[in-house]
Image: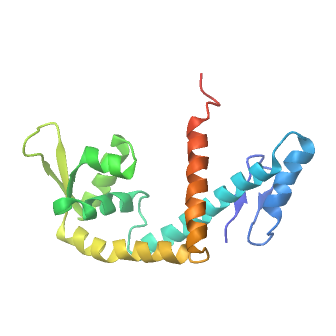
Amino acid sequence: MVVYRWISGLRTLDPVADKDSLSAYAQRYQDVYPWADAAAIELWSRVGAAYIAQRAAQERLYKSFGLEKKHGRFAVLRALYFAPGHRLTQLEIGNDAKVTSTHVTYLIDSLEEDGLAVRSPHPSDRRMVNVELTPDGLELCLRLVPAMAEFIGEISAGLTPEEKVLLNQLLERLRRSADASNHGEG
């Protein structure tokens, strides 16, 4: 069950138990601030609730493969799995997984501890380090990567192909708007 705690801290809403709670929450904003866009606030809330539900389901999948330790490990494993020779530099992994170099180091440390990946010197650049799947890491990826594709299909099975295309387009526009927002910056 997803429980979403609102920033106000005044109320905990359970979208599963109260299907209109997100609409009511958005309407309360507009009641207090007539200029507020209740539909936008509801959208924001639903995207957040969907993210929380998606993340919880994803964590359950990872846990079933023994990857419950650290978030982000799948992104590194997937990048290595799809790479030629199952090998990339740490920089390439960071770019593929969209994470900072510090976080890549942390994730690779974790995968090395579990025997799923190994570092080695880059053959032509001393400043670079290669990361490669171990046989155990490859065996895990042979099961996990297709399981993730199946999981994603199941999660979005309630949408038609056309709705998936439209939702992708709308979410991309929302992401670009968020990227372009300058609130909070100098």
Q: Nearer the viewer, residue 120 or 163?
A: 163
The answer to whether any part of residue 106 appears in the image is no
**Residue at the farthest front position:** 162
**Residue at the farthest top position:** 186
Q: Indicate the quadrant where residue 13 lies.
A: bottom right
Residue 157: % across, % down: 56, 77
The answer to whether any part of residue 141 appears in the image is yes
Q: Residue at x 82, y 52 (%)?
A: 26
Q: Nearer the viewer, residue 51 or 83?
A: 83
Q: Point out the image quarter for the C terminus.
A: top right
Above-or-below relation of 48 to 138: above
Q: Indicate the quadrant where residue 86 lies.
A: bottom left
Q: Residue at x 88, y 50 (%)?
A: 28
**Residue at the farthest left position:** 123
Q: In screen coordinates, is 40 left or right of 147? A: right
Q: Residue at x 81, y 63 (%)?
A: 21
Q: In screen coordinates, is 177 left or right of 7? A: left
Q: How is the image coloured?
A: rainbow
Q: Residue at x 38, y 42 (%)?
A: 100
Q: Indicate the quadrant where residue 12 lies.
A: bottom right
Q: Point out the image quarter for the N terminus.
A: bottom right
Residue 46: % across, % down: 70, 59
Residue 164: % across, % down: 57, 67
Above-or-below relation of 113 to 57: above
